[in-house]
C-alpha cells in the first residue's frame, strides 16, 4: 500500500469514530425519551449536556484531524526525501533490498564517524568505497567470490597472458588454517631460488598479516616493481619456528606447459595451469612428443590450481574419446554441456599425476580421464573444487568474480569438497626431495613404473 492510501485509511477511521459517537448519542436520546413527555427543565438539562458532549467530541475530532495532518506531512516529507535520494542515485531503491535508504544512511553515518574519530591515518574515500564492495562479496561466505578494482583486474588479465612481475609461485588457500599457501613453484623463478616450497603457509607479507585476506589481496602484496624484494614470513611443516624468506621480484614468464622426452619411449608433459596460452602450448607439446616417437605419456597435474574452463575443455579434446568432457549446472538448474568429437583421442597408454594441490580445471581433466578409463591416476587425492567462477566486468573497469555453477564429470560426479582419488596412492617424499641436490621425485618414479607396465 502506498503512503497516500495509508493516510486516507486513517482519516476514514477518525471520521467513522466521530460519526459513531453522534449516532450513539442520538440512539440514547431516542431510547430514553420514547413515549415519555419531557418537562422544560429536564429538556434544558438534557440540551446542556448534549452541547457539552458535542463540544467534547468536536475537540477530539479536531485533535485527531491535526494528528492525521501531521502524519500526512511526515509521510509526504519521507516520500519527497526518498524521491530526491533516488533521483540522486539514478535508480529506484527497493525497500526489500539490503541496499535501501536505511542502509545508505547508516553507511554515511559510519563514514562520518570514521572521519570524526579515526586516529591512525587518513582514510581515502576510494578505499572506503572499495571496502564496501569487498564487504558485499565477503558476506557471501564464498572464498572464491571477490571484488576486483580496475587495477586488480588489469593485473589479473596480465597474469593470464603468461608474463608478470613477481616471485614465480602459485598461491592457493589452505582450508585448515584459511591462510594462503604456496601451491606450486615455477622452475627457475625467484621462488625456487629462495627455496620456497609447495604447502608453505604465508603468515605475513612484509610484516602484514595475511589472515582474512583474499587471494587477490595477498598476490597484490607479493607482486611489485622489478628488482625490489618482498619478505615472506612462512610456516613450514617440520619447522619449530617461523621462517623469514626474502624473495626478489622480477619479470616471470609462466610456461604453463612443459614437455620432456624420457627413457623407454615415455613422454612427460607437465601442466602447471590452464590459461588461454596453454591451449597452443599443449598442442605443440603433444606434436613434439609424437614426433619423438612417444609410446606412453605421463601427464603431470600436480600443484595445478586450475584456470580457464574453456582452456581445459579445448585441451581435453586433444586426448579424450568422443563424448562428454564436463557439464555445469547453475542455481536454476540450467545445464551447459561441453563435449568432444573424439577425432584426436590419445592412442598411447596414459598415466596422470595428481596431488592435494590439483584443483578445479585440473580436476576436470583428471575426472574425465578417470571416467573414460583411458589413464591411470597416480599420487594423492585432489583438492576438491567442483564449482565454477565467472569474472563479470563493469563499465568503470572494476569486476567481480562470482561462483555461478557446479561442474560434473562425464559420469555425473560432483567432486566439490571430496576430490578425486588416485588409482595408485603414492605420497610425496618431501624430505628426500628437498634433502638432496638431485631432487629425487618418488611420485614421478612411481608414475614411470605404472606406465611401463601399461606399455607392455
Image (cartoon, rainbow, N blue to C red):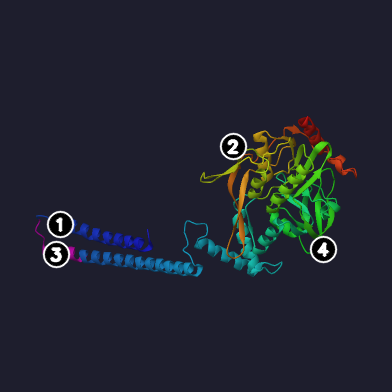
Q: Are marks 2 and 4 in contact (CB under 8 Å)?
A: no
Inter-mark Cα distance, 2 to 4? 48 Å
Nearer to us: label 1 or label 4: 4
Nearer to us: label 3 or label 2: 2
* Residue receiving disc 3: 41
Tell me which label, 4 or 3, sits earlier in the chain.
3
* Residue receiving disc 1: 30
Q: SS for tag 4?
A: loop
Nearer to us: label 3 or label 1: 1
Tell me which label, 2 or 4, sits earlier in the chain.
4
Q: Residues within 10 Å of mark 2 (few under 14, many from 20)?
A: few
Inter-mark Cα distance, 3 to 1? 18 Å
The magenta region covers 36-48
Tell me which label, 3 or 1, sits earlier in the chain.
1
| Residue 39 magenta | yes
The residue lying toward the viewer, choosing from 423 and 416, is: 423
Q: Residues within 10 Å of mark 4 (few under 14, many from 20)?
A: few
The residue lying at 21 percent from left, 64 percent from top is 49
Inter-mark Cα distance, 1 to 4? 101 Å
Q: Which quadrant of the figure has residue 129?
A: bottom right
The residue lying at 78 percent from left, 42 percent from top is 268
* Residue 433 screen position, x and y as percent: 86, 42
* Residue receiving disc 4: 228
Tell me which label, 1 or 2, sits earlier in the chain.
1
Inter-mark Cα distance, 1 to 2? 84 Å
* Residue receiving disc 2: 412
Q: Which quadrant of the figure has residue 414?
A: top right
Amino acid at each position: 500500500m502506498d503512503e497516500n492510501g495509508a493516510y486516507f485509511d486513517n482519516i476514514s477511521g477518525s471520521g467513522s469514530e466521530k460519526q459513531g459517537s453522534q449516532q450513539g448519542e442520538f440512539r440514547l436520546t431516542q431510547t430514553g425519551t420514547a413515549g415519555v413527555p419531557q418537562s422544560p427543565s429536564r429538556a434544558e438539562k438534557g440540551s446542556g449536556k448534549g452541547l457539552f458532549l458535542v463540544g467534547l467530541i468536536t475537540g477530539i475530532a479536531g485533535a485527531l484531524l491535526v494528528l492525521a495532518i501531521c502524519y500526512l506531512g511526515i509521510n509526504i516529507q519521507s516520500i519527497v526525501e526518498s524521491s530526491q535520494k533516488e533521483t540522486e542515485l539514478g535508480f529506484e531503491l527497493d525497500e526489500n533490498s539490503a541496499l535501501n535508504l536505511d542502509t545508505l544512511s547508516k553507511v554515511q553515518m559510519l563514514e562520518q564517524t570514521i572521519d570524526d574519530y579515526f586516529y591512525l591515518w587518513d582514510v581515502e574515500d576510494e578505499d572506503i568505497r572499495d571496502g564496501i564492495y569487498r564487504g558485499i562479496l565477503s558476506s557471501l561466505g564464498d572464498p572464491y567470490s571477490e571484488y576486483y578494482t580496475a587495477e586488480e583486474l588489469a593485473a589479473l588479465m596480465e597474469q593470464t597472458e603468461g608474463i608478470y612481475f613477481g616471485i614465480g609461485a602459485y598461491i592457493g588457500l589452505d582450508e585448515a588454517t584459511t591462510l594462503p599457501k604456496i601451491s606450486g613453484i615455477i622452475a627457475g623463478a625467484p621462488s625456487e631460488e629462495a627455496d620456497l616450497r609447495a604447502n608453505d603457509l604465508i603468515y605475513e607479507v612484509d610484516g602484514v598479516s595475511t589472515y582474512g585476506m583474499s587471494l587477490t589481496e595477498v598476490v597484490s602484496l607479493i607482486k611489485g616493481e622489478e628488482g625490489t624484494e618482498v619478505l615472506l614470513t612462512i610456516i613450514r611443516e617440520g619447522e619449530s619456528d617461523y621462517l623469514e624468506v626474502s624473495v626478489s621480484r622480477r619479470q616471470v614468464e609462466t610456461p604453463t606447459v612443459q614437455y620432456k622426452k624420457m627413457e623407454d619411449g615415455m613422454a612427460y608433459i607437465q601442466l602447471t595451469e590452464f590459461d588461454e596460452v596453454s591451449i597452443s602450448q599443449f598442442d605443440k607439446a603433444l606434436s613434439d612428443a609424437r614426433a619423438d616417437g612417444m609410446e606412453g605419456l605421463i601427464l603431470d597435474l600436480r600443484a595445478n590450481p586450475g584456470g580457464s574452463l574453456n582452456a581445459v575443455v579445448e585441451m581435453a579434446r586433444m586426448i579424450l574419446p568422443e563424448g562428454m568432457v564436463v557439464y555445469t549446472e547453475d542455481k536454476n538448474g540450467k545445464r551447459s554441456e561441453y563435449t568432444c568429437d573424439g577425432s584426436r583421442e590419445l592412442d598411447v597408454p596414459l598415466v596422470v599425476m595428481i596431488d592435494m594441490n590439483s584443483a578445479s580445471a585440473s580436476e576436470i581433466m583428471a575426472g574425465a580421464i578417470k571416467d573414460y578409463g583411458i589413464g591411470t591416476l597416480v599420487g594423492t587425492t585432489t583438492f576438491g573444487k567442483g564449482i565454477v567462477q565467472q569474472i563479470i566486468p563493469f563499465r568503470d573497469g572494476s569486476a567481480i568474480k562470482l561462483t555461478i555453477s557446479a561442474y560434473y564429470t562425464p559420469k555425473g560426479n560432483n567432486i566439490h569438497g571430496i576430490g578425486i582419488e588416485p588409482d595408485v596412492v603414492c605420497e610425496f617424499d618431501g624430505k628426500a626431495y628437498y634433502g638432496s641436490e638431485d631432487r629425487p621425485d618418488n611420485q614421478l618414479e612411481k608414475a614411470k613404473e605404472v606406465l611401463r607396465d601399461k606399455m607392455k
